[in-house]
Image (cartoon, rainbow, N blue to C red):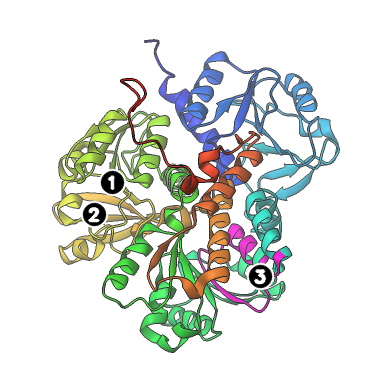
Amino acid sequence: MPPGPDPDTLAWASGAVRRFAAATNMLVAARRFRIVGGDPRDAAALHGLLTGLGARAAAEHEPVDQLWCLGAPDESTAVIEREADRPRGATLVVVDAGRHLPAVDEDAFGPVTSARPGVLGVPVLSDDVFLVSTGRDPEDDPAAEARLRWARRSMPVSRAVAAELRDGGLLRGTRIGVAMFLEPKTAVLSLLLRDAGAEVVVYAHADETDDAVAEVLRQAGLTVHASSTATTAEQKALALAMLDTRPHILLDDGSHLIRLAHQERPDLLPTMLGAAEETTSGLRPLRVMASRGALGIPVVAVNDARTKTFFDNRYGTGQSTVFAVLDLVDELASGTHRVRTGGTAVVAGYGHVGEGVALVLAALGFRVTVAETDSVRALQALFAGYAVAPLTDAVREADLVMSATGVPDTIDLGVLRACAGGAVIAVAGGVDQEVAVHDALADGAARSTIGRKVERLAWEDGHHVLLLDDGGCINITAAEGNPVEIMDLSFAAQLGAVRMLLERGDELDRAVVPIDPAVDEATARAALAAFGSRPVPPGFLAEHPADREPDVRTRRFGDPA
């Protein structure tokens, strides 16, 4: 086997891809790319990383979504001008990934405009061509309105579903409460619902609120109950204020508002059509409530939609959480942590999120060990090429430990004490105390801040680990959440759940109900078109499964009598 890229080259490629993702909030997987110029070794490392993350090198005459420029500006300019000749609405992102010098001459294309922090539009070429430089940091200006416009242009599936709801008039007179991470993509969902005829009320937890985005929604006329500085008591008051607007439908993330309504506003439940929940950790308590007969409304399990779980959990959360972790670690002073290119990482849990986290870590050059208590999932991890070991054993030599279970105390006190000194610990997804911080403090650990959203937990015997963002959901609290194309799929499923509740909420059981398979089919077909592929026409069996049963008689031994 030929040797892979040297650690410095792989680290450069990793940094370039992460800076692209941070600037654009866009997905790497499923996108077509082409690399222009540069040192062949750099190009090979970048090619290997992009394909490892799920991107696809474009054929010679195939249009591309991302053009990665590594060589001389003159060489890049000619290719950019050629690739810019494309159908309207087909976005091209040109990435200046020059390793030592700029590979794109921005002045060659005339005046440029700011599309969002870190992204420049090139109107002389096309309204759909954008430039990103991985050699400079994006501006600090929150530019909320620009970020909303950027998100909206990259959410064609949600726009199409919302247009159907608008044209059908289903949302007129309906009040919808949106309780999710308040950032540009969620803001676009809220505005799409408003434009489709609904009255929309928004709530977000303090650590999940982008105040600039909240203000844009307020200026657009939406009622927003959210502040990044709210205390726990103030957050509860804001959440109750949202519930007191008496929404007919709740769209929730973590089921906190659904459960709060049952606990504090039970009189609201008979007036509701239902709710939709988009996370695994949020559905777990709702299923317990349903089993006890305590769930007072139907809740559509958006999380279980195939177009959500197979993509949001694996590709979206995998990319965004790992990238957020490594971006935070890169800001730390050298020598304060163990994480390095080619180092070791442990993933606790191998569900859809764990699969994605492991995939991204491996693509970035980490040697990955999976710790999974479900034997079948552990076997899946082994077949995927990862080492498998009990968590306490796996963390002893690990540089990076990421929990992907959504279960409290996954990284318990015993695991924390077993970790290698200086190991970095983070949570992908997550629930409160997925890392047992309270137990660590009770055990005598002292905490101190050593960087942005990074704390050291240190015991008197000298053992210490680095904890990112208090064990919070790292891609939300330290970055901009999942890539926009991924949330387009998830929010299209949310809109499909809204349609279900509007059309037959009164008929649904007061339980966690599966999403209509037709929502998955429609979402996937629209997404295939948006990603530049032609969906295969559905076959007869796909259209009429109930009308066509298989012949149960075997014909292996000739025609049956």
Q: Where does label 2 land, which residue?
A: 410
Can residue 137 be seen here? The reply is: no
- Give the residue displayed 67% in from the left and 49% down from the top: 156
Q: Residue 218, relative to residue 34: is it above or below? A: below
Label 2 residue SS: loop
- Give the residue displayed 47% in from the left and 42% down from the top: 548
Specify the segment rendered in magenta. 168-191
- Are the residues flagged by discs 1 and 2 in contact, CB closer than 8 Å? yes
Can residue 454 be seen here? The reply is: yes
Q: Where does label 1 land, which residue?
A: 349
Q: Position of residue 385 (x, y in %)?
A: 30, 27
Q: Where does label 3 land, which residue?
A: 170
Neighbourhood count class around disc 2 (C-alpha, 10 Å): few under 14, some 14–19, many 20 upward: some
Q: Earlier in the sequence, mark 1 or mark 3?
A: 3
Q: Is residue 492 magenta?
A: no
Quadrant of the snapshot with the C terminus: top left
Say left or right for 436 vs 144: left
Q: Amino acid at mark 1?
A: Gly
Q: CA distance from mark 2 to mark 3?
A: 43 Å
Q: Amino acid at mark 2?
A: Thr
